Image (cartoon, rainbow, N blue to C red):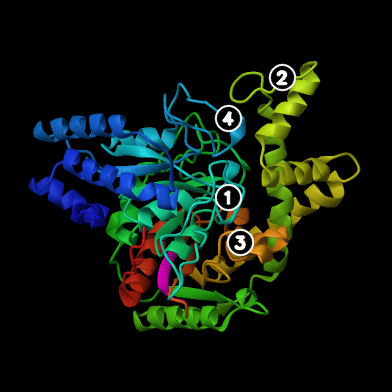
């Protein structure tokens, strides 16, 4: 581990500006770290070393001419869901074998325009469907954290497990990720990193492989709150190519970090206190409440009565949209093709071989709930429930509440191939119990490290904000971060 790779983005930016290091030096340090660690962690599915060095050299040349972007020379990892021109983009799926797009996603194009350097593509759950990064065609990602006195491999969370693991293990300065039901916030919480899912429409979805179009939203995973703010400012934009992109100016999120929370009203939703919740999660939540109160925030109890319906409604809406979005992968135009006796057989053989078990399960659920005779009973009802969930939040915010504080996950990281989880998909889905409401309502949510479990692994808290008020989340998350301190895994890889 090089000293350069332990720098935050803000620290690296300062060293680059002072001439104490160069983009090429920084990039080479990260590439060496990836080379040494990736066989153990499996965080990257493709390393673009040559391209990274070219981008770093170009960055140094721009700096020499006085042309400095917001992320000039900062090496980043990119989730395998974002299209990167001429570079492996497969959503960690067999069905997209060999696919290298001829275009760039808007989010990554924004990062490159601001001077960032691409280190490679990061592992993830196949088509972002999973909560543990175990559904990837490229195998499970290992969490850099381990329990005290244990060599058991733990999951990094999902679907952005590669992004979270790479940031936590110093294999990139920051990473792009996506969140459909908690896929930024849950892995961030399980790896001791910071992850923000911005308001729906804040980041363009153009060029990002779709899972559930009305829920998907890009965001960053970073080492601390300031770095997350720096990355989100570059990732966010208005985009004419995405009809769900919102035409609003992108604020300077970094300016909100360190802002006082005195006078803010923080709501504590009573429905998030669930039966069987571990005592350490309850204790952590109370600790977060105490920290925000000590910083001058007013704490109020609130009710979100339809929360209990969020998870079942989500697991109808998301698979329904997935079954529609994934219909395009048929072996005809790109990716895997398995020959058949006729075109229908070719479709069937290709999709059977190309999709993994969890993706097939969700396609089948989605097709079922959209089918004649079941559409009204399932899909239409779930959409009505979604409206009620959104209304719950609107009423709470209308009462003067500025943000909500909740746990990020129901537990710390569990073991890879945990039999309890593997044998019961519903238990795996319950990992998203605190996060899916945010996507159903289109709101911003941030996960911030807040403590360690009894076993010495990270636990996170979640802050949920008003639409397009990410700045309040950064301010409040920074208070928690300052009180809790920074957490780093002991290196074993």
Instruction: Determine whether label 1 and label 2 are within 8 Å by CB.
Output: no
Instruction: Determine whether label 3 and label 1 are within 8 Å by CB.
Output: no
* Rendering quarter of residue 344: top right
Task: Please provide the residue range marked out in magenta.
Answer: 447-453
Q: Secondary structure at mark 1?
A: loop
53 vs 222: above or below: above
Relative side of 463 to 338, left or right: left
Is residue 11 visible from the viewing direction of this image?
Answer: yes
Relative side of 233 to 373, left or right: left
Foreground mark, 4 or 1, reads: 4
Foreground mark, 1 or 2, reads: 2
Label annotation for residue 432: 3
Q: Secondary structure at mark 3?
A: helix
Which of these two is toward me, 239 or 483? 483
Q: Residues within 10 Å of mark 2 (few under 14, many from 20)?
A: some
Which of these two is toward me, 81 or 149? 149
Residue labelled with disc 4? 96
Q: Secondary structure at mark 2?
A: loop
> Sequence order check: which comes first, mark 3 or mark 2?
2
Q: Secondary structure at mark 4?
A: helix
Residue labelled with disc 2? 339
Q: Position of residue 296 (x, y in %)?
A: 36, 80
> Sequence order check: which comes first, mark 3 or mark 1?
1
> Sequence order check: which comes first, mark 4 or mark 1?
4
Which residue is found at the position 77% from the left and 28% from the top? 348
* Rendering quarter of residue 411: bottom right
Our reading of the magenta stretch's main secondary structure is strand
Residue 420 highlighted magenta (yes or no): no
Which of these two is toward me, 265 or 292? 292
Distance between mark 3 and mark 1 Cα atoms: 10 Å
Distance between mark 4 and mark 1 Cα atoms: 20 Å
Distance between mark 3 and mark 2 Cα atoms: 38 Å
């Amino acid at each position: 581990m090089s000293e350069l790779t332990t720098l935050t983005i803000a620290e690296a930016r300062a060293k680059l500006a002072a001439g104490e290091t160069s983009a090429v030096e920084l990039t080479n340090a990260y590439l060496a770290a990836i080379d040494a660690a990736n066989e153990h962690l499996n965080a990257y599915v493709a390393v673009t070393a040559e391209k990274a060095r070219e981008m770093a050299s170009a960055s140094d040349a721009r700096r020499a001419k006085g042309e400095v972007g917001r992320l000039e020379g900062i090496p980043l990892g990119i989730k395998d869901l974002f299209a990167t021109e001429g570079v492996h983009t497969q959503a960690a799926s067999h069905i997209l074998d060999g696919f290298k797009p001829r275009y760039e996603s808007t989010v990554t194009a924004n990062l490159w325009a601001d001077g960032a350097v691409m280190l490679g593509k990061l592992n993830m759950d196949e088509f972002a469907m999973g909560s543990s990064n175990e559904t990837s065609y490229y195998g499970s990602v290992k969490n850099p954290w381990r329990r005290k006195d244990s060599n058991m491999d733990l999951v990094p969370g999902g679907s952005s497990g590669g992004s979270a693991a790479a940031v936590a293990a110093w294999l990139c300065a920051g990473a792009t990720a996506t969140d459909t039901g908690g896929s930024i916030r849950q892995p961030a919480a399980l790896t001791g990193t910071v992850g923000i899912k911005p308001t729906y429409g804040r980041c363009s979805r153009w060029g990002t492989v779709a899972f559930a179009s009305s829920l998907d939203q890009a965001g960053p995973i970073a080492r601390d709150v300031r770095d997350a703010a720096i990355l989100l400012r570059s990732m966010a934009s208005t985009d004419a190519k995405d009809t769900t992109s919102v035409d609003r100016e992108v604020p300077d999120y970094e300016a909100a970090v360190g802002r006082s929370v005195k006078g803010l009203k923080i709501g504590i939703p009573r429905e998030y206190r669930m039966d069987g919740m571990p005592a350490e999660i309850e204790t952590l939540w109370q600790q977060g409440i105490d920290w925000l109160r000590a910083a001058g925030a007013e704490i109020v109890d609130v009710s979100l009565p339809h929360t209990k319906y969020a998870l079942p409604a989500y697991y109808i809406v998301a698979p329904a949209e997935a079954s529609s979005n994934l219909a395009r992968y048929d072996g005809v135009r790109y990716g895997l093709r398995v020959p058949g006796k006729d075109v229908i057989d070719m479709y069937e053989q290709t999709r059977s071989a190309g999709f993994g078990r969890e993706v097939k399960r969700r396609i089948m659920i989605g097709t079922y709930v959209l089918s004649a005779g079941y559409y009204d009973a399932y899909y239409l009802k779930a959409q009505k429930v979604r409206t009620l969930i959104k209304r719950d939040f609107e009423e709470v915010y209308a009462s003067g509440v500025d943000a909500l504080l909740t746990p990020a996950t129901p537990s710390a990281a569990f073991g890879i191939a945990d039999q309890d989880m593997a044998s019961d998909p519903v238990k795996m889905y319950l990992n998203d119990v605190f996060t899916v409401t945010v996507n159903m309502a289109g709101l911003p949510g941030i996960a911030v490290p807040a403590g360690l479990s009894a076993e010495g692994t990270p636990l996170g808290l979640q802050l949920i904000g008003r639409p397009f008020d990410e700045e309040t989340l950064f301010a409040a998350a920074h208070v928690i971060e300052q009180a809790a301190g920074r957490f780093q895994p002991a290196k074993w890889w």
